[in-house]
Image (cartoon, coloured by chain):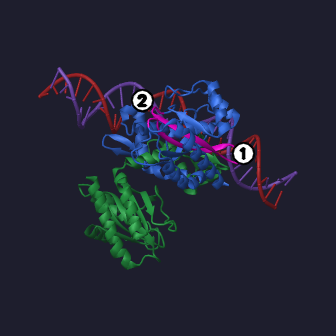
Chain colours: A blue, B green, C purple, D red
DNA sequence: ACGCATGTTTGCTACTGGCGAACGATTGTG
DNA sequence: CACAATCGTTCGCCAGTAGCAAACATGCGT
């Protein structure tokens, strides 16, 4: 399946794009160096992408342009889960007082689809559209727990990279974590993906009990005591996830 | 400049993507037919893009996937104009009672960057992220009017394609339209881009009086009388554009 | 059972993606 | 002020691949 990408040029094209995305703008030499490509080659790609309206020059570096906005927003609005969740997410953020997110599962990847903050002082590091790891985040674990066994095993063989010192990297421990997620329909993230932040998540499953998305609330460790997290907010998250599932029927 | 795109494969890759985007999902044969490519070639592209997470199979057709969401949203949030406009746009939509939009100019293209509707019953056909034509929309004309002369002339030579029966296609008439836009800092769109819809727009310019964006309000012809459009709403649009310009300093 | 649509796979070849090297333009450093 | 070290860009060039035609597999409606 994942021999190699059939069309190499497209692959390098998106390698360049994501590198620019991560660096929030970059120049030719910079990109050629970090992607191990020739300057000339990178330059050709940048020219092509600029002409097509997917990159724009901002001073001396290339930046992601608005050409992607339409693609990204229609991809999201096609999602029924997203459509029915927006109002519920807002409520969840306000009653919990922290950051409420909707994440989705697509092709073995987790993506934060929508996010609402209770107030502007909270600057949660994950943003809408960001990829989230399936093993280190609450939403990721919630989704992974409700996926077919073979998919879980395949994920485990790829290895559980440590993202913070508290990330679960032991396979057996991780399997227990998923089992507990299935038992209680809730998972926690205790600084496993971002130091200083913890979360609670609950899965959103289809009629076959396969996860398609997850709801989560995240807050800074110093403002969110264990008790409040594990009791009050946990209840809110689970009931929001349930409500969303009902709206999908 | 626009000899040909240096990297053809990337060009066809995005031709395929936009075709899927326009059709809101498509299959291999369908795409090969309308883009005049071989089925095998299209298939390779689709496989590559799927593996990279930019397409997903939904039943029997390929759809734009969430991989683009991150790219699109960061492109937008990088825009200072967007950042400072959101609250003002909301106010504009509410006080006018119709649809308020912020459009931007990038590489000779217009794009609707943000949009707020006063109420949900309004279903304005242009959505966030959509390309808008520079000669048939109010926002497009507002921006074009405040661009360098050579750019305007270049645009005129490409031809003013009629989009609706009321689209201005005569070069001289169009030049007069732009002049009037410069005189009053306001332009109208009277069903020139969408039948049944009209708009008012005012440009947002930088210190050199070059347009970088435009603010507009759109409403259905049967609910928006000429008087209200040309007086009350026009004033609101112009003052909103001015406020945004001030916030940019 | 057949015909016709689809998606997928297989060689094959002309073309092109990506390389190294060289060229100006800028920068900043001694 | 000149030198060194960047940067982005352009130029040929060759191996490798993008894209083709055609065959194959599969599913649908008649």
In depth, the one of B115 and A236 nearer the eye is A236
Q: Which residue is labeled 1 in the image?
A: A208
Subunit of label 1 = A
- Say which residue appears at 31% left-offset and 40% top-offset: A60
User: Percent x, y for residue C15?
Assistant: 51, 40
Q: Which residue is labeled 2 in the image?
A: A34
- Say which residue appears at 46% left-offset and 67% top-offset: B163
Residue A154 image-quadrant placement: top right
Residue B154, label in figure: none
Subunit of label 2 = A
- Say which residue appears at 47% left-offset and 77% top-offset: B222
Q: Is the residue A143 above or below the residue B158 in the image? A: above
Q: Nearer the viewer, mark 1 or mark 2?
A: 1
Instruction: Considering the whole magenta stretch, tell me its main secondary structure.
Output: strand
Q: Is residue B22 magenta?
A: no
How far is disc 1 from disc 2 in space, using C-alphas? 44 Å
Q: Is residue A209 magenta?
A: yes
The residue range painted magenta reads A194-222
């Amino acid at each position: 399946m994942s021999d190699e990408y059939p069309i190499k040029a497209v692959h390098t094209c998106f390698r360049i794009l994501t590198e620019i995305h991560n660096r929030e703008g970059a120049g030719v030499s910079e990109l050629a160096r970090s992607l191990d490509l020739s300057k000339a080659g990178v330059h050709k790609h940048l020219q092509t992408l600029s002409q097509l309206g997917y990159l724009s020059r901002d001073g001396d570096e290339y930046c992601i342009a608005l050409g992607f906005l339409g693609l990204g927003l229609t991809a999201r609005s096609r999602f029924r889960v997203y459509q029915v969740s927006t109002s519920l997410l807002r409520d969840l953020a306000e009653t919990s007082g922290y950051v409420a997110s909707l994440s989705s599962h697509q092709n073995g990847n987790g993506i934060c689809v929508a996010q609402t903050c209770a107030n502007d002082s909270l600057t949660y590091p994950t943003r809408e559209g960001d990829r989230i790891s399936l093993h280190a985040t609450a939403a990721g674990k919630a989704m992974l727990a409700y996926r077919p066994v073979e998919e879980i095993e395949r994920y485990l063989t790829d290895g559980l990279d440590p993202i913070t010192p508290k990330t679960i990297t032991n396979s057996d421990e991780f399997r227990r974590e998923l089992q507990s997620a299935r038992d209680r329909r809730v998972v926690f993230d205790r600084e496993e993906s971002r130091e200083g932040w913890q979360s609670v998540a609950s899965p959103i499953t289809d009629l076959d009990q396969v996860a398609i998305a997850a709801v989560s609330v995240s807050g800074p460790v110093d403002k969110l005591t264990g008790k409040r997290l594990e009791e009050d907010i946990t209840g809110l998250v689970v009931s929001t996830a349930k409500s969303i599932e009902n709206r999908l029927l």
